[in-house]
Image (cartoon, helix red, strand yellow):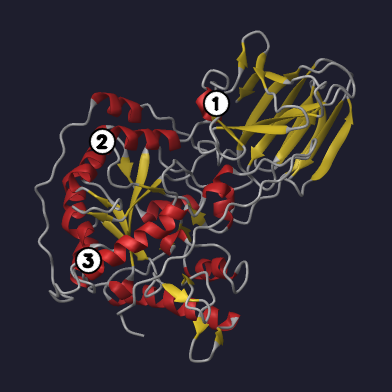
């Protein structure tokens, strides 16, 4: 199989999973981030642009050993004082994971995945002026081993190995003393000139100490045929149709094909004098369960690399325990045309809150989202707290800052739930701790009854019992890494053991509140005095 690869045909956009029907006191909060993964625009647009650009310059053959002259004259003015202040004031927490930014190419082009050098320089200048640091793969390895992630840091990554990374990005990083990671399609190095970097350029980048060079497949950044009709799917997640044999490859053949490609990407980097890569970036962020089996791709990647990189297009995101279960990290795309203010706002929106400082539950309504990820304006009643009205016969749940609390592991949360009229009035409300984690705890409250459920929709009741009928009840959950203690009206009603996740980073998650009314006559619930510490 040679280096020349035909232009890929793109897969259809993925469909969103169906929403679960509401259930009284057993409703699982639908993870916001799971509904936003593999955004269709991200999946297809980079591939179209990448190959179109490559073909446009195919005739400009300057040799696989060519070294393009770098442009070192690009700089940025001192950053606006208000943006510097915003980044300096961005919250930090020891209970957080890495913030990772993704770029593709730096240069002057029409694609949204080609960021202008001046814009990239302004972004790096802002990080420098605000006192933020850029981090290395060694620091990411340290975090996986249990060391805290350093505050006010970002990992800068580039996918594919485009020539603009060498020509423009490297001199800008050198100017500001910053570090980055390049994920290289090793089989495309020195091809499609002048689009892809050459090995001499990559060697000089590595020698500078500014770069980690990691894996992005060898020849697997393509689509493969999946049937006799010519339909195609991503190389890593599809069973390939073998035209000469008139059939799909077997699961064993799939494993061999994918494993050999990833092994070759590692071999090529080592053969050219670089360290063996520890990290891998999924092409097109395509990491869905492979057609060969639900866990096969994750097992292959996990056997060869310490962790893998995903992408989220358009919105702030953070790594969750669901990601870490597969040793994946979430990244945020940076695209062309984004203003410096919007870029800074994205970093702030993804900056982790700390439980000890998360106090603006009812004042800052923009921190809340619905269970499907939409922002919500919490209806605040100054006399009685926050009204939560799902409507007759409906269920609703609100998550507090899910992106910024995704790896909370040790905290205490308490709140008062009120609005009840009498026993059996048809209203249920309550609190969810470790929201979005498989071990989340849902504490449901009615006028005269409580129930504690561990897990989501398939969870099980771990405690339940009567309460003295009252118009309000106080719920408290105390969490450490091994146990959750649940109190209702000051009485300990449950001690729930928590099982460490396979990744070692869970259980973890933020908080949610939920409510359900059975009928028009059911009272409208409220919550108040929400405290986290």
Q: Residues within 10 Å of mark 1 (few under 14, many from 20)?
A: few
Residue at (67% x, 19% y) in the render? 387
Percent of width and height locating residue 380: 60, 16
523, 86: nearer the viewer: 523
Q: Which residue is mark 3?
A: 195
Question: Who's the residue at 47% across and 47% down the image?
Answer: 147
User: What is the spatial separation of the Cα atoms under label 2 and label 3, in whole angstroms?
Assistant: 28 Å
Mark nearer the viewer, 2 or 1: 2
Q: Nearer the viewer's eye, disc 2 or disc 3?
A: 3
Q: Residue at x 53, y 91 (%)?
A: 245
Residue with the mark numbered 2: 126
Q: Nearer the viewer, residue 507 or 58?
A: 58
Q: Secondary structure at mark 2?
A: helix
Q: At which x and y percent is residue 287? A: 51, 62
Up-down: is 83 above or below 48?
Answer: above
Q: Residue at x 45, y 49 (%)?
A: 312
Element class at badge 3: loop
The C terminus sits in image quarter:
top right
Q: Between 455 and 243, which is closer to the camera in this rendering?
A: 243
Q: Going by the image, does 471 lie left or right of 134?
A: right
Residue 202 occupies which quadrant of the picture? Answer: bottom left
Which residue is tagged 1? Answer: 356
């Amino acid at each position: 199989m040679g280096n020349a690869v035909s232009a890929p045909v793109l897969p259809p956009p993925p469909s969103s999973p169906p929403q679960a029907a509401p259930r009284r006191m057993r409703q699982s909060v639908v993870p916001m981030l799971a509904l936003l993964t593999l955004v269709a625009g991200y999946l297809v647009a980079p591939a179209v642009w990448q190959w179109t650009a490559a073909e446009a310059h195919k005739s400009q053959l300057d040799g696989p050993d060519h070294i393009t002259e770098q442009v070192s004259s690009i700089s940025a003015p001192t950053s606006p004082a208000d943006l510097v202040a915003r980044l300096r004031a961005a919250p930090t927490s020891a209970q957080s994971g890495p913030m990772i930014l993704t770029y593709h190419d730096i240069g002057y082009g029409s694609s949204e995945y080609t960021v202008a050098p001046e814009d990239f320089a302004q972004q790096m200048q802002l990080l420098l002026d605000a006192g933020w640091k850029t981090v290395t793969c060694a620091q990411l390895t340290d975090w996986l081993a249990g060391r805290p992630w350093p505050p006010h840091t970002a990992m800068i990554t580039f996918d594919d190995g485009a020539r603009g990374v060498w020509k423009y990005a490297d001199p800008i990083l050198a100017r500001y003393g910053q570090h980055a990671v390049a994920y290289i399609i090793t089989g495309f190095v020195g091809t499609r000139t002048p689009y892809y970097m050459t090995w001499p350029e990559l060697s000089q980048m590595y020698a500078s100490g500014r770069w980690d060079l990691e894996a992005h497949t060898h020849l697997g950044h393509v689509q493969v045929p999946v049937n006799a009709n010519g339909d195609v799917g991503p190389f890593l997640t599809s069973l390939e149709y073998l035209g000469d044999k008139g059939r799909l490859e077997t699961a064993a053949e799939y494993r061999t094909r994918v494993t050999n490609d990833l092994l070759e990407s590692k071999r090529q980097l080592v053969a050219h004098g670089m360290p063996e890569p520890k990290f891998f970036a999924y092409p097109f962020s395509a990491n869905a369960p492979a057609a060969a089996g639900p866990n096969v791709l994750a097992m292959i990647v996990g056997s060869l690399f310490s962790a893998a990189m995903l992408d989220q297009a358009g919105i702030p995101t953070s790594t969750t325990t669901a990601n870490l279960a597969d040793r994946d990290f979430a990244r945020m795309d940076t695209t062309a045309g984004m203003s410096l203010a919007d870029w800074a706002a994205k970093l702030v929106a993804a900056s982790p809150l700390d439980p000890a400082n998360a106090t603006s539950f009812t004042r800052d309504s923009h921190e809340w989202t619905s269970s499907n990820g939409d922002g919500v304006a919490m209806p605040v009643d100054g006399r009685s707290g926050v009204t939560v009205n799902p409507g007759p016969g409906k269920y609703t749940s609100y998550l507090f800052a899910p992106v910024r609390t995704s790896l909370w592991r040790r905290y205490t949360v308490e709140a008062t739930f009120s609005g009840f009229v009498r026993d059996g009035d048809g209203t249920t409300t309550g609190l969810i701790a470790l929201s979005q984690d498989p071990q989340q705890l849902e504490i449901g409250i009615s006028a005269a009854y409580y129930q504690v459920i561990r897990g989501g929709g398939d969870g099980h009741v771990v405690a339940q019992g009567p309460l003295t009928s009252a118009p309000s009840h106080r719920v408290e959950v105390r969490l450490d890494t091994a146990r959750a203690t649940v109190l209702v009206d000051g009485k300990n009603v449950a001690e729930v053991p928590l099982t460490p996740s396979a990744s070692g980073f869970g259980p973890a998650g933020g908080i949610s509140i939920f409510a359900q009314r059975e009928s028009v006559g059911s009272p409208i619930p409220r919550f108040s005095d929400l405290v986290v510490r």
